[in-house]
Image (cartoon, grey):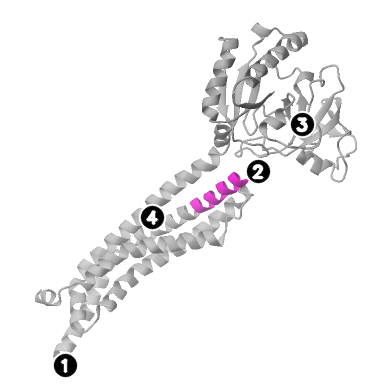
Amino acid sequence: ISILRRELMDFLKAGNRTMAGSISKHRLHAVFVISQVSLSVILLITAGVLVRNLNAVLQKDVGFQREGRIAFKIPQPSYRFGEGDNAYQYEVLPFQERVLERIRSQPGVIGASASNRVPISGDNLSYRDFAMHHYEYANGEPRANALRVITLPGYFETVGTKILFGRDFQNTDTFDSEPIVIISQNTMERYYQDLDPVGMSINFRGKDLKIVGVAEQVQDKPFFLESDGYTLYFPFKAVTHERGLTNYVVHVNGDPVQQMANIERAILDMDPKLSIKSVTFDDVYDLATFAQKLPMVVTVIFSSIALFLSGLGLYGLISFTVAERTKEYGIRMALGAGRGNILKRVIGGSGRLIGWGLVVGLVVSITLCVQINPMLSDINTVHPTTFVMVIGFVIAICVFASFFPAQRATRINITETLQY
């Protein structure tokens, strides 16, 4: 018996040397598995960062309400309405009032107004600098830039933006009245601080304007465009610059899509030749966040594919190893090795590959997150929760892929194996 045991041990040592040579032949397979695991870690962490960034964007207060809000863009071509200030005042403005009256008369309409642009859209994004009489710019300090938004009375109430101080525009704010403006909340916080801006003046394009109100901060641009300025609101009846088309904003009760169709029909009854483009505020918001959603979806898809391939590669490599070492495992079990010992040996081999893949993936992921952190100002890209969740998920998938071939190794028929 002693001689037999010694011969079997010598055989196992020889088998290990043979196996070592075989492993060296298939080392490339292990490198592929490590690469796949690390790639899946990198992509999953990147996807996690983008998901957190998107969630931060979606949770951000945009300063207006989307529910039940619709926008209608209607051109006012000069060949139909004429040119010049007189045509604008006596043809375009009355036309706008008729459209609004028709919209407000429709069932389910809570409120309606008009503007030169829809919040968070990419329309009319021209910025102009302005100056405050009470504020002196420091040397090298850039001048304040403002987005010019022109509105009719009731606009803020219709879109759900609060007037924090002062008042909204009124029908009496016209060409002949005192030039006025409503400033945005961030303008007040930056340049007025402890001062009450209502009643003070700013200079815009060489003209002094009296501040009559402060509006809640609104996300004027799509999220993929950097916000680099402030917002100034002007009364529609006192300016002539934006006369080519009008954006009618409507607050409705009920299904916005159905209401949109009803209102379109009502407007076309006034003039069948009108060109109308309608959209819900939800659609405008979805387009504004598209740049955040697209890379997240793409990264999630590719990370899922990479994780599937890494699990498949790990399963194939371990299955091949188990098949190659069947004789060795049978002899070990004949010598008294338990099934748990065999299972531990097989899982341990896959664990080393998983460990190397995790190390490489984490190093690359941390480096990548540090690089993109300045571009995602709302979150910290190197977040422990994201890393822990990804690591746990990858380990679970890889262990699951390793378990079945490892189980197969423990079900080896000792008698049949020793016959060969």
Relative to residue 164, is residue 371 drawn left or right? left
Q: Which residue is mark 1?
A: 2
Query: In x, y percent, where is residue 385?
Result: 54, 61
Secondary element under disc 1, as helix, strand or loop, is helix
Relative to residue 193, is residue 112 drawn left or right? left
Relative to residue 247, is residue 176 drawn left or right? right
Circle 1: residue type: Ser
Mark drawn on residue 232: 3
The mark lying in front, picked from 1 and 4, is: 4
Mark drawn on residue 61: 2
| First of labels 1, 2 by sequence position | 1
Vertical arrangement, residue 166 with respect to residue 303, above or below: above
- Can residue 168 be seen here? The reply is yes
Q: Which residue is mark 4?
A: 307
Instruction: Quote the CA–CA distance across marks 3 and 4.
Output: 50 Å
| First of labels 3, 2 by sequence position | 2
Q: Image point 58% across, 44% down: which residue?
A: 58
Residue pushed farthest left?
419
